[in-house]
Amino acid sequence: MKKLYLMLFFSALTLSAMCQTGVVTTGGTAIGNGGSVTYTVGQIAVQRMEAGDKYVIEGVQQPYEIQTVGVDDYPDIVLEAILFPNPTTSTVRLRISNYEIPSYGLTAELFDIHGRMIQIFTVSDLETQMDLSSLPSASYQLRVLDDSRLLKTFKVIKNKQ
């Protein structure tokens, strides 16, 4: 009898873990003056809530953090971002190898999570140190460009000092 209870318990545990996932077509976060809402399109497990002529259909959402940003259009260019310590508290070093830096230099643009440009750095050497000590703790996106051509995009995590 105990074996039956254990088998039922682990079966229920396995099913409950599997119920929290879903394959959806797209989603995002909408932000406005009244707040924000995260949504998905194509959610399978849903519940409809109504209030007068308004309604909301809510479902299960799972957050995923994806480290790869964009498509590598230039695989022959090897740009290496060295974040030490990772996450960083003050500076980030960008080391460039296997790419000839033009005389006018490269540009490194730092964006916040909302897509606003925070800082622009000129990259004129094979190794460039960028000071992020004045920035708040957050995730940032560092885009390295040659003129207007995007070469690489890196994720930078800044912690408190």
Image (tube, rainbow, N blue to C red):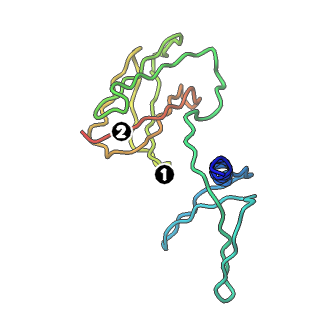
The residue at which mark 1 appears reads as 114
Are circles 1 and 2 on residues that touch, CB within 8 Å?
Answer: no
The answer to which image quadrant residue 61 occupies is: bottom right
**Label 2, on which residue?**
158
Q: Amino acid at mark 2?
A: Lys
Q: State the CA–CA distance, disc 1 to disc 2.
A: 15 Å
Furthest residue to the front? 1
- Most foreground residue, 153 or 29: 29
Q: Residue 154: percent from the left, percent from the top?
A: 50, 31
Q: Residue furthest left?
A: 161
Mark 2 closeness class: few <14, some 14–19, many ≥20 residues within 10 Å:
many
**What's the residue at 38%, 39% (across, down)?**
119
Nearest to the eye among marks 1 and 2: give it. 2
Above or below residue 97? Residue 138 is below
Residue at coordinates 75% horizontally, 59% vertically from top-left? 44
Q: What percent of the width, then of the height, locates residue 42? A: 75, 58
